[in-house]
Image (cartoon, helix red, strand yellow):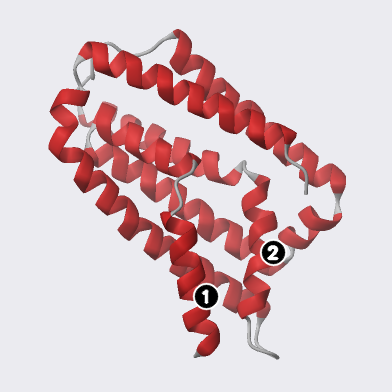
Amino acid sequence: MTLIVSFLFAIIILTLTPGFDTALVLRSAAAQGWQRASATALGVTLGCLVWGVAVGLGLGVLLLASEMAYNLLKWIGAAWLLYLGVKLLLTPRSEVAYTSGSENREQGYLSCFSRGLLGNLLNPKVGVFYVTFLPQFIPAGASVALWCTLMALTHMIIGLMWNAVLIGGSHYFAGHLRRPAVLRVMDRLTGCVFIGFAAKLALSRR
């Protein structure tokens, strides 16, 4: 019980700390509405679950032990963030596009979901953090794979709850943020944030 309480306290603090995932969800909420922001949040939090399962199965140990594996995923993640940032800087939106066809809506949701999922999965620091953080809360003799998965699932649920609060709060001023001038400024600012995270990830060391 002490381990569980300690883990919940630590993971809640981690979830509430603003980062790349928070910026991504807030930007989606302001620019595209709560439904697509929810898809982005689902992608982000599902990435945490995938990392937890991977760490439990040994991928986290590989990232921690292999400099080549860590650097490869790190540079892919940095390139992805850089691409998103430069795209927002060069081609910011002037309006929010709404489509009436169900196929287009599904593609839009899939795109938002993929952006959140890939943004999380291509950040090797999440895997390294999990492999150094989660073992502290695994009882002696317990299944590492099972406990890592359960803790990652808990992180996912807490993350979804926090993102719901963020998305719900942004709803009140979403109309103002959808103005063309404001949307362009926000896209460019978000692009700068993404580029900053890309640089931070590329320059990071274990």
Q: Please tell me which residue lies in front, 28 or 56.
A: 28
- In the rendered image, is residue 100 in sight? no
- In the rendered image, is residue 203 in sight? yes
Q: Position of residue 137 (x, y in %)?
A: 61, 79
Residue at left offset 36%, top offset 40%: 25
On screen, residue 201 above or below 38: above
Q: Position of residue 118 (x, y in %)?
A: 54, 40
Q: Tell me the element at label 1.
A: helix
Residue topped by disc 1: 7
The three-letter amino acid code for the residue at tag 1 is Phe
Q: Tell me the element at label 2.
A: helix
Residue at left offset 32%, top offset 14%: 184
Q: Quadrant of residue 62?
A: bottom right
Residue topped by disc 2: 131
Q: Residues within 10 Å of mark 2 (few under 14, many from 20)?
A: many
Q: Quadrant of residue 160?
A: bottom left
On screen, residue 206 above or below 109: below
The three-letter amino acid code for the residue at tag 2 is Val
The answer to whether 94 appears left or right of 71 in the picture is: left
State which mark lies toward you, 2 or 1.
1
